[in-house]
Image: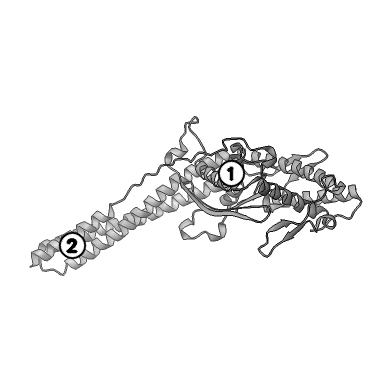
Amino acid sequence: MNTARAARYVAAALLGIMAAGCNTTTVKTTEHEQVRTEPVPIAENLLLDVGIGIFNPGVGGLGDEDEAVFARIREAEARFMPFKLAETLQNSGNWGAVRVIPDRQSEMDVWVDAEILKSDGATLVLQVSVEDASGRQWYTKRYEESASKYSYADDLATRMEPFQGTYNQIANDMLVFRQRLNAADVAAIRQISELKFAKEFSPEAFSNHLEVDDRGDYHIKRLPAANDPILVQVRQIRERDYVFVDTLQEYYASFVRQMEEPYREWREAYYVESKALKEVQAKSNARLIGGALAVLAGILAQGVDSRTANAAGWVGIGAGATAVMSGLNKREEAKIHIEALEEISASLNSEIEPHTITLEDRTVTLTGTVTEQYHQWRQILKDLYAAETGKAPATN
């Protein structure tokens, strides 16, 4: 009986030691969905312009699981990702002008908004909503994509955006909805977009052209004459707005070019560091648990009236204590990985600098937020419109 008990305690001790050394390996691959295009090019008068807002960085919802994700990185990603999506949409040939515009400060035919739910170099999760100028909701969808180590290959010939598949999927989903619209639908969306712009600059002339239903959707009550002199002036103002907005797209392009390499390095390092961190934490937990079990089995074995069991118990206690210490050492190693990620975050943040944009008649230095710059520009436009028409500038 004592021998059987001893065997059980020895087995328990060995299981504890074995548990301390166990780990698993996972392999991920990434296959990018290709962007689809219309078989016949869309006529220019049926192309819809797209505005993409600065993404919600989602920093307010970071939990313990994402504690190593830094708010500064998310803020940068919130400007980086919309431009990447804009490039994808523009290159598809399925849309008119595609622009990154914060807070919808310039009227567009279609709007794309998104929130970053997770971004750690290994996984990207976005919540995306798309609607048109009439307020009609196209769709809301959650996108998730996992990268693999091959996404960060050093071969420049094969290097690509690790999460290009997500941008491609969004573009394809938008095209599916666009294909459901007929020519009359598209024309109405474009007209509503123009009338909303006109109403902002000349509310007294265009307030009665649109109506809003109980759901908040816009409908056209009547259209102004094509040669309406006020509409002609508004269209000229809108062209100036496009010039400024396009200039700010150059800012975004410059920002992305400067950010791209350090951001890629950060994501690759984060991918590697996060993977190592998870492995370290898994080993740490396994060794702590396995060590504790081994120690417990060893202690219990001391109560058995058997030299064999007692010897096995002391072996279990010693091995368990070693495993526990090893686990604690791994916890310290995990702290080193976190510190490395913090250093990478700080180095990337230093790459983000203000930009100066030269317009036709003035120079604008973007020292504030892009949102503030857009707001200032819209006020300048209103002042210009008021000066040209002799009317008091419209107020927000």
Q: Is residue 249 above or below residue 211?
A: above
Q: Does 170 sit left or right of 381 as displayed?
A: left
What amino acid is labelled 2 in the image? Gly
Q: Is residue 226 left or right of residue 285?
A: right
Quickly name the residue at label 1: 85
Q: Quadrant of the N terminus?
A: bottom left
Q: Earlier in the sequence, mark 1 or mark 2?
A: 1
Dot 1: within a 10 Å radius of its alpha carbon, few (fewer than 14), some, or many (20 or more) residues? Answer: many
Which x, y percent locates residue 236? 82, 43
Tell me if mark 2 has few (under 14), some (14-19) or many (20+) residues whose alpha carbon lies within 10 angstroms of its own: many
> Looking at the rendering, which quadrant does residue 284 occupy?
bottom left
Res 262 quadrant in image: top right
- In this rendering, the answer to whether 71 lies above or below 353 is below
Q: Residue at the location (69% across, 63% down)?
A: 213
- Count the numbered circles shown: 2
Instruction: Say whether residue 45 is visible.
Output: yes
Q: Is residue 76 above or below residue 2?
A: above
Q: Secondary structure at mark 1?
A: helix
Kindly report the distance in space between the C-alpha atoms of the residues bearing marks 1 and 2. Answer: 62 Å
Looking at this view, name the residue that lies furthest to the top: 157
Q: Nearer the viewer, residue 373 or 318?
A: 373
Residue placed under numbered mark 2 in the picture: 313
